[in-house]
Amino acid sequence: LSSRRTKRKDWTKLIYSSNLSPGQVLRDDTTSSSGIDVDEDEDDFFTVKKSGADADAETLDMTKVPVPADELQKWEDEELLDSIRHLFITGVNNDQD
Amino acid sequence: MAQSGSFLQFSGHHYLRHRLVLSVLSGKAVKIDKIRPDDKNPGLRDYEISFLRLLERVTNGTVIEISVTGTAILVKPGIIAGGSVSHDCPLSRSIGYFLEPIVMLAPFAKRPLNLTLKGITTDDKDLSADIIRTVTLPHLEFFGISDGLELRIKRRGSSPLGGGEVQFLCPIVKQVKTLNFVDPGKIKRIRGIAHAVRVSPQFSNRMIEASRSVLNRYIPDIYLYSDVYKGEDSGKSPGYALTLLAESTTSALHCAEAVSQAGVAPEDIALDAARGLLREVQRGGCVDQKHQTLVLLLMVLGSEDVGRCRMAEPTERTIQFLRDVKATFGTSFKIVPVDPLSEGPTQLLYSCYGTGYVNTNRSLA
């Protein structure tokens, strides 16, 4: 759904003059709805605080971006495999037409 | 060299490494607070403390203050000293976690760095020693950092027990060249390294066969190397991985890697790596997504001229990195689509005016 919108994205503006988190910038999520879920069924004196807006609090600082399994699965498709042939030297150059 | 009166302020444990790198390069002190304040186990993790220790060893005169709870740190950077350093990495993160930021600092040291790191050489979170050797280091060469640049994988170490060892040699430069890299070219060759330690050596060959089944259709110039480590040199834990890289006619590099998982056949690991590579190639651009921050940083440090580079969309890390770079050096990038009408993944042109960073540590020698 975002393919048309991403082209019009003003990256410079989104990165430098917006308060969106990096994830929101990528998802084009201007209406940042921070779903804060508080489970109130606990009577404990100490409760573990859950930061709803920052649910990815324990995401690790890692350089390898995990690729979702379905992103890799779709490369079984012959048509998709053929669609990037032009990026190799042996492929026909279909950029020109 | 530290400029007094200006310090950087960040919150949270995210992006700790690149913020410390920016601090050291700019000479500005950095304050980072709210490091996991609400966590059951608040404060810095062992690998983060280990990284701070490594940073202290690679530099000279760095002052690190950690609050009692470990949820805030203040780092006053000294000069990047370089020289001979050895460090044992904790087993919670692989060597790549420590080496990635050091690669950003080492060219600007006073003396060439000779760093020995021990621990896990390949895992699924950080760049493996193979990727750093075959992909990261060639990226430095675009900026004129090449003679004597080397990473030797002396021993391999798989997760969880590690036992690997690498040696990183990095020359020093006075200034980095301005990058002008806008033609991604076409992929002319694919290279790969398969390794299998403490498991049947046949696993390497099985991975190579399986990835060829996907990649052979594109180009004939595919060379996949089975890297054999025996005995002591193969570390303490069993594991195997396949690292693939595609090189274009203009020397653009794209890479992908898949690491052994319990209960998954080597063939499936190899297919993951091959498909990951195709995905990376499809995203296009001159730099693959794992190396965006390194290239952007060196563009900022380039001579006072406009540097340009064509890349795919930024990752989350890259977006935050760009913001932190602006906070540190005041440099912002101009990011525009290369061809707004083109089909397929968005290609962006990143350009900035270099700060003309000069390695002042070097002139002290």
Image (cartoon, rainbow, N blue to C red):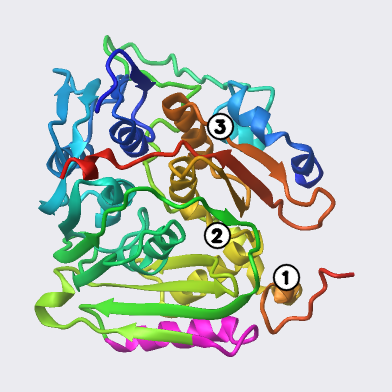
Residue sitting at x 16%, y 61%: B161
Dot 2: chain letter: A
Q: Which mark is residue A80?
A: 1
Identify the disc placed on residue B332. Answer: 3
Check if mark 3 and mark 2 are on a common chain.
no
A90 with respect to B198 (left or right):
right
In the rendered view, does B232 fall on the left or right side of B184? left
Sequence order check, earlier mark of 1 and 2? 2
Q: Main secondary structure of the magenta part?
A: helix
Relative placement, left or right, of B197 versus B288 is left
Compared to residue B153, the image places residue B174 above or below, namely: above
| Three-letter amino acid code at the position of disc 3 | Ser
Q: Nearer the viewer, mark 3 or mark 1?
A: 3
Q: In the drawing, what numbered circle is on residue A69?
A: 2
Instruction: Identify the magenta region.
Output: B201-222
Q: Please, what secondary structure does the residue beneath circle 3 have?
A: loop
The CA span between labels 3 and 1 is 36 Å
**Mark 2 Cα-neighbour bin, 10 Å: few <14, some 14–19, many ≥20:** few
Specify whether disc 3 shares its chain with disc 1.
no
